[in-house]
Image (cartoon, rainbow, N blue to C red):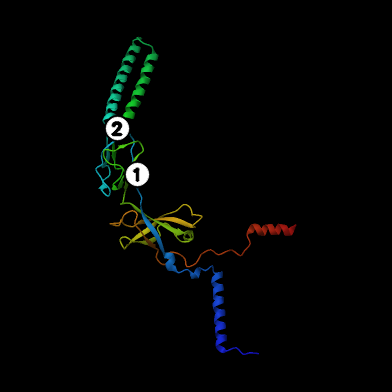
Amino acid sequence: MKHRHPLHMLCLVASMIVLHSGVSLAKDGGRSSLPPSDLQTVRGIVKPVVEAVLASEIQALVKRMPFRDGDGFKKGALLVEFECAKYRAELASAQAELEARQKTVINNEELAGLHGIGRLEVEISQAELKKAQAAFSRAQVIVQGCRIHAPFAGRVVKTLVHPYESVNPYDDLLSIVNNQDLDIELILPSSSLRWITKNSPFSFSIDETQDAYPAVVAEIGARVDPVSQTIRVFGRFNKHPAGVLAGMSGSAKFPEGTFPAKSPFTPSTKPSSSKSSTGEQTAKK
């Protein structure tokens, strides 16, 4: 029988220890092999809370667009003005028709009081008055669409038409964005639902500015993506960061201790009460 060298025996013992450690990690679900730093940093993107693509409501010629790409504007500022001489003339015609119908109704009611005409003529004139009122209201709405004002303060992202171009209803005119109210959209593993909550603090480092900004979790997505097993999480800056624009990207870092070192879930080894009662009934039978 051959005797093993002491060094060979030492290596064999070390291998068995490493193998035993690997089995222990496998039983623990491999949680110890995940470095906390990998769980703390998540990529994200800055998104505006309010943005819009304004469209035309009428068919007309673009008369004026005071703002160009990148320009800032205040709420209520004139963004687009159309050439609307035809629509204003139609409004004046509708107003004249409305006034005529009003006078007709007044005259018919007086005649009906003197038994000069029947009640049917009065009701017909009243219906014609309502029709004229509807036409006048429609003409007013069309004329109001001749000037498009800013629904909020912001900046022009892109102009999609130019002055002296003709547009049709529902044609896109320009894209605008509000850079004063920003969100941070993060994509986290669905397992993060074990520890992330609303108002969880984190810092967001933006690539373009090379600065970190304090933020908190504002909302957690309503569903988990079944394919990627991820969930969308939205954060808000504690204070509006100067120079930060929508579309910038960066990394969110959650502080130490935000998430547990290991899963709090522990499978129960006790049989449920329903199973126990079922077993008792079976035994009795």
Q: Quote the CA–CA distance across marks 2 and 1.
A: 21 Å
Q: Amino acid at mark 1?
A: Val
Q: Nearer the viewer, residue 262 or 51?
A: 51
Please identify the quarter of the rendering in which residue 92 is found: top left
CB contact under 8 Å: marks 2 and 1 = no
Left or right of residue 284, residue 177 in this image: left
Type of amino acid at the residue the image marks with label 2: Val
Task: Please determine whether, in this image, residue 172 is positioned above or below residue 126.
Answer: below
Nearer-the-camera pick, 85 or 150: 85
**Residue at numbered disc 1:** 53
Q: Residues within 10 Å of mark 1 (few under 14, many from 20)?
A: some
Q: Quadrant of the N terminus?
A: bottom right
Instruction: Tell me what residue is drawn at x 50 percent, y 68 percent.
Output: 31
Q: Residue furthest right?
A: 285
* Vertical arrangement, residue 82 with respect to residue 111, above or below: below
Q: Earlier in the sequence, mark 2 or mark 1?
A: 1
How many numbered dots are placed on residues in this image?
Answer: 2
Residue visible at 49% across and 67% down in the picture? 262
Residue tagged by mark 2? 143
Q: Is residue 92 above or below residue 221?
A: above
- Please state the horizontal and vertical placement of residue 97, each as a whole percent of the image: 30, 21
User: Which image quadrant: the C terminus?
Assistant: bottom right
For label 1, the SS is strand
Give whichever of 202, 109 is nearer the camera.
202
- Please tell me which residue is depicted at 54% across the width and 71% down the height of the picture: 25
Q: Position of residue 15 (x, y in %)?
A: 55, 80
Decide: few, some or many residues near mark 2? Use Cα within 10 Å; few <14, some 14-19, many ≥20: some
